[in-house]
Image (spheres, coloured by chain):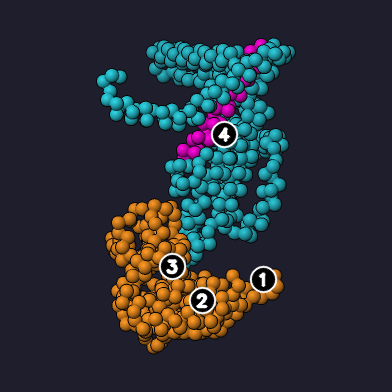
Chain colours: A cyan, B orange
Amino acid sequence: MSNLSVAQRISQTQVVTPMLKKLAPQLILPIVGILVFLLCWHVLAGKVDTSLGKFPGPVQVYEQFNGLVKAHIKEGEKAEAFYARQEKRNAAKLAKDPDATVKIRPYTGKPTFFSQIITSLYTVMTGFAIASLVAIPLGIACGLSTHIYNATNPLIQVFKPVSPLAWLPLVTMLVSALYVSDDPLLSKSFLTSAITVALCCLWPTLVNTIVGVAGLPQDLKNVSRVLRLSPLTHVRRIVIPASIPMIFTGLRLSLATGWMVLIAAEMLAQNPGLGKFIWDEFQNGSSQSLSRIMVAVIVIGLIGFALDRLMLLIQRQVSWDKSAVLR
Amino acid sequence: MSHTHHLELSGVGISFPTDKGLFCALQNVNLKIKKGEFVSLIGHSGCGKSTVMNIVAGLYQASTGGVILDGKEVNEPGPERAVVFQNHSLLPWLSCYQNVELAVQQVFAGKKSKREMREWIEHNLELVHMSHALDKRPDEISGGMKQRVGIARALAMQPKVLLMDEPFGALDALTRAHLQDSLMEIHATLGNTVIMITHDVDEAVLLSDRIVMMSNGPAASIGQVLDVPLSRPRDRLALAEDPAYNKCRQQVLQFLYQRQQRPAA
């Protein structure tokens, strides 16, 4: 410190202090909030007795998280061992008789918590993709034409508030009736969950796209008319770029809705995924179940948050409106 | 050309349906404009200046009468009647270059090669002195610059008539003077027919060959047409002392503030 000149020291404190002041609300306050939450949770959880033992506190949940990680690693080792054995067996078979037909069977172990996460993500993305492919073009059509809007608006208003749980039995029956295949590429429960997700996360994108397109400023419409842009060019060069910010707002809401709906759908449809994990643990009723469900709750929240951030990143890349408040 | 008049408005009127029945906004507007003429429309706000321009642009349909451009009736918008909008109306997601490019691609598709298009776009942006900001987006440049790009976009359509709806209304006085000078320079070079809406008396006298003064609505019409007998090129400093200039100015002011009292606004 003694080597530093006075000027350097001043400049250092001048730089460091404002940085700390700036960081305090952004970094320290969230940590304080989380700590207070954990403390309350810890104290209160210990006071509640359930039929499955004490309600889990943060410590038990952390232990169960570690347990789930270990189980996943163990399952991975088992699978590896299985494939190694299979390969060895097949190699031996081929060495004896080069014309022998060898069978390669997939490992069918119990899905772990982490493989359930992958399944859930895959399902929600499929449902979200279906919903977006329907909602964006339909929204553009409704936003451009008041006739189409008037024709579809009552239906949108009626179907928008319907809960996923109401759709699920219908979708299950429809999938069973219509998706008949001897060698199905996709399992029925997967399709049921994905379609239910799509039905529920269609609406925010649809409504926001309509609002975005219908709100196209008259001046830009006039530019398009003076240039005599064809309807397709008008949509491609004027309408879509102008409504990109609103479309993305809708997409973000849709993805969040889809993720919430998915858990409920998986619980009921018995589609592999986080919802099924929770349901199975609940049915299982061991002393660890509640802690494991709590792990799932936190992971679901974190993934939901991560998905929203991901959409935000994409929005920042795609949208021209960098000045818009992106939260 | 067999037509002495390039652009002709005859008996133009327009009514809008309202809750209380038809509202007649404009009535019996007759105007003949020669090729290369610079005409200003001036009047109090709400007198239907913009309506006249929108009818010429084809954005509105006249209820009575009609507009004829080079012997053809105008009934839809088109790039031969390019519009410079009051608030520039540039597409915010495109750069200056791309904004002009959209117009050029639309108007010259199949007529110009890619290289010719690029040269033409750059040429038009150079005319309005915006060559330095080709890749800037509208939100990165000033209001005056946006309006310059808006003018470049309109000019790039190679219009028969350039329609300008209060093009400098939203700009500060200094920027406005710069743009007026640029516009005079462009008009001298290209000789476009220009119809400009303004409510700035000095601007009208400085730029125009004729000033069309509109009476107040409802059922607004043309109140008086004033010829501006000033030789070009015009210089704003020299004109300040010019008696002819001041006479014109006075006549417009008299029309606006004596014969057509501003309606309670």
Which label sits in the foreground, 1 or 2? Answer: 2
Badge 2 crowding class, 10 Å Cα cut-off, few under 14, some 14 to 19, many 20 or more, is many
Image check: A203 left or right of B135?
right
For mark 2, name the chain.
Answer: B
Residue A135: percent from left, percent from top: 58, 47
Q: Do labels 1 and 2 share a chain?
A: yes
Q: Which mark is drawn over residue A189?
A: none
Q: Check disc 1 and give the amino acid type.
A: Thr
Q: Check disc 4 and give the amino acid type.
A: Val
Q: Are marks 1 and 3 on the same chain?
A: yes
Whether A311 is among the magenta residues is yes
Residue B9: percent from left, percent from top: 49, 82
Alpha-carbon span between mark 3 and mark 4 = 51 Å
Q: Name the residue under label 4.
A: A124
Q: Check disc 3 and give the amino acid type.
A: Pro
Q: Residue furthest front?
A: A6
Q: Mark 1 points at which residue?
A: B18
